[in-house]
Image (cartoon, grey):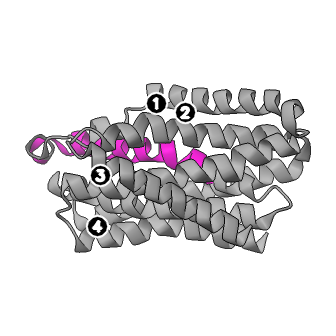
């Protein structure tokens, strides 16, 4: 449990670390942001496949026997995030908020936009946290650490990228940092929820692993790749994703 608590704090803290870097490097070009986010997407993609989906097949009985529950879990994980996306605006839709409109709006309108922004980020941070926690439900602690490391590495550029839009929208630096902190706390809670869920019911472990993997695959495909290929840096973003995937693959082999 100690490892899980430390991991939860590390995963959430990575967002704050990224936020601090965001304050230092306030003007990040679209190209650099796309490259960083694509690298993170590659990390998450490898973590989902190597640390969650393949173990799900193994814990489900291995081979063809373990496939049905894994496939069902993947799709239900994706459907869940898709449903959440329909309830709360996408992060990339909110990143284009007009700074002047926000500055000139009444305080209630400003708070509303801030809450939407926080909720959009939390949509993805909570299931990512669950994935980190579920990873520790297996007997292989290394898998749990690798998944958490992958998510933490993804959180750093995400933390950097969300700072600039909020500052340009007229949100005070102190409040901006607090918002980033909230998104990190959501991930900490998700990590603990995921771990406790599989600890209390080991029978659901194969499904839980696949479900968590499905949520990550959905976020990578629907949000991260889409965003990083929207500003003319598709080639650089693609190679950055491949580098991120290979980094995670190397860590998995060396530490596995």
User: In the drawing, what numbered circle is on residue 81?
Assistant: 2
In the rendered image, which residue does mark 1 sit on?
A: 85
Element assignment for label 3: helix
Q: Earlier in the sequence, mark 3 or mark 1?
A: 1
Looking at the picture, does residue 149 appear above or below residue 245?
below
The quarter of the displayed image where residue 142 is located: bottom right
Does the magenta-highlighted stretch encompass residue 215? no
Viewer-nearest residue: 217 or 80: 217
Viewer-nearest residue: 47 or 238: 238
Dot 4, crowdedness within 10 Å: few (<14), some or many (≥20)?
Answer: many
Looking at the picture, does residue 74 appear above or below residue 106?
above
Q: Which segment did they paint magenta?
A: 103-130
Dot 2, crowdedness within 10 Å: few (<14), some or many (≥20)?
Answer: many
Element assignment for label 2: helix
Element assignment for label 4: helix
Q: Earlier in the sequence, mark 1 or mark 4?
A: 4
In the rendered image, which residue does mark 4 sit on?
A: 22
User: In the drawing, what numbered circle is on residue 166?
Assistant: none
Residue at point 76%, 41% (across, down): 208
The quarter of the displayed image where residue 136 is located: bottom right
- Between the C-alphas of marks 4 and 3, the distance is 21 Å
């Amino acid at each position: 449990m100690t490892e899980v608590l430390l991991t939860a704090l590390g995963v959430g803290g990575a967002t704050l670390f990224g936020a601090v870097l965001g304050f230092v490097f306030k003007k990040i070009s679209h190209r650099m942001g796309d490259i960083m986010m694509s690298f993170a997407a590659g990390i998450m993609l490898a973590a989902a496949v190597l640390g969650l989906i393949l173990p799900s097949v193994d814990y489900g009985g291995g081979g063809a026997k373990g496939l049905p529950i894994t496939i069902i879990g993947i799709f239900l994980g994706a459907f869940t995030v898709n449903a959440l996306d329909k309830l709360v605006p996408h992060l990339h839709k909110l990143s284009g908020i007009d700074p002047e409109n926000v500055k000139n709006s009444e305080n209630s309108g400003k708070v509303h936009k801030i809450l939407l922004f926080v909720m959009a980020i939390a949509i993805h941070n909570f299931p990512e946290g669950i994935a980190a926690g579920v990873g520790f439900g297996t007997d292989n602690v290394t898998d749990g650490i690798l998944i958490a490391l992958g998510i933490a590495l993804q959180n750093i550029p995400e933390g950097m990228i969300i700072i600039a839009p909020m500052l340009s929208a007229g949100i005070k630096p102190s409040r901006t940092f607090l918002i980033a902190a909230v998104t990190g706390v959501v991930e900490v809670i998700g990590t603990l929820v995921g771990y406790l869920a599989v600890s209390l019911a080991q029978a659901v472990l194969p499904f839980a692993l696949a479900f968590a993997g499905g949520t990550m695959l959905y976020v990578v495909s629907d949000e991260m790749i889409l965003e990083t290929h929207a500003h003319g840096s598709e080639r650089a973003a693609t190679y950055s994703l491949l580098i991120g995937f290979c980094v995670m693959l190397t860590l998995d082999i060396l530490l596995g």
